[in-house]
Amino acid sequence: MKNKRRDFLKQACAPVLMVAFGIPVMQACGKQDDNEETNATNNIGGTVSINLSESQFSSLSAVGGWMNYTAENLLLIRISNTQIRAFDNACPHEGNRDKWSFANNTFTCSYHNNSFENNCNGSLRCYQTSIADGILTVKR
């Protein structure tokens, strides 16, 4: 009788634990929310104009400066005096947009420490950019 009870508990506990704890764990690793994904999709094909003289873009004034421009779902990095690269800030792993860092030519998403190089050949969607008269234009 004791062995039957033990076998039952071994078989029943795993599904019960998964039901109790699995859903919150899965939600914690999921995308932020469906509205942000829809908004990002709607931005594809549009053009964003950024006045680089505005104070919120001061981090882009020096080569190597970068920012996560969450209002437009963009990661921006100053490559040279005449070039800024723009990437979609949705992490290819889970779609998170808000916890990025940058070091050694690599963007890192802090949710799961996934890293992506700042070139247009990697996993991050890269957009065409141009700078004229202090205005950065990003074509999605």
Image (tube, grey):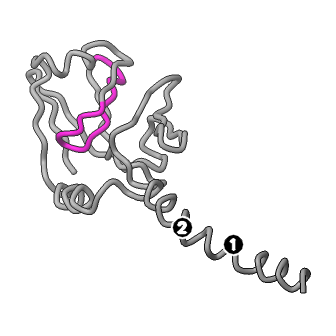
Q: Quadrant of residue 84?
A: top left
> Is 50 placed left or right of 101 in the picture?
left
Closer-to-camera residue (100/25): 25
The image position of residue 9, as x and y in percent, is 76, 77
Q: Could you tell me which quadrant the N terminus lies in?
A: bottom right
Q: Secondary structure at mark 2?
A: helix
Residue of label 1? 14
Q: Quadrant of residue 60?
A: top left
> Residue, x 27% and y 63% (percent of image)?
34
Q: Secondary structure at mark 1?
A: helix
> Residue, x 69% and y 72% (percent of image)?
14
Residue of label 2? 20
> Is 120 placed left or right of 84 in the picture?
right
Q: Residue furthest front?
A: 1
Q: Residues within 10 Å of mark 2 (few under 14, many from 20)?
A: few
> Residue, x 45% and y 54% (percent of image)?
28
Q: Is residue 77 magenta?
A: yes
Q: Quadrant of residue 17?
A: bottom right
Q: Is residue 77 above or below residue 10?
A: above
The image position of residue 85, as x and y in percent, is 32, 34
Closer-to-camera residue (112/77): 112
Q: Is residue 12 above or below residue 122?
A: below
Q: Is residue 92 magenta?
A: no
The three-letter amino acid code for the residue at tag 1 is Ala
The image position of residue 4, as x and y in percent, is 86, 86
> Residue, x 17% and y 60% (percent of image)?
42
Q: Residue furthest top?
A: 62
Task: Please give the range of residues in magenta.
Answer: 68-81
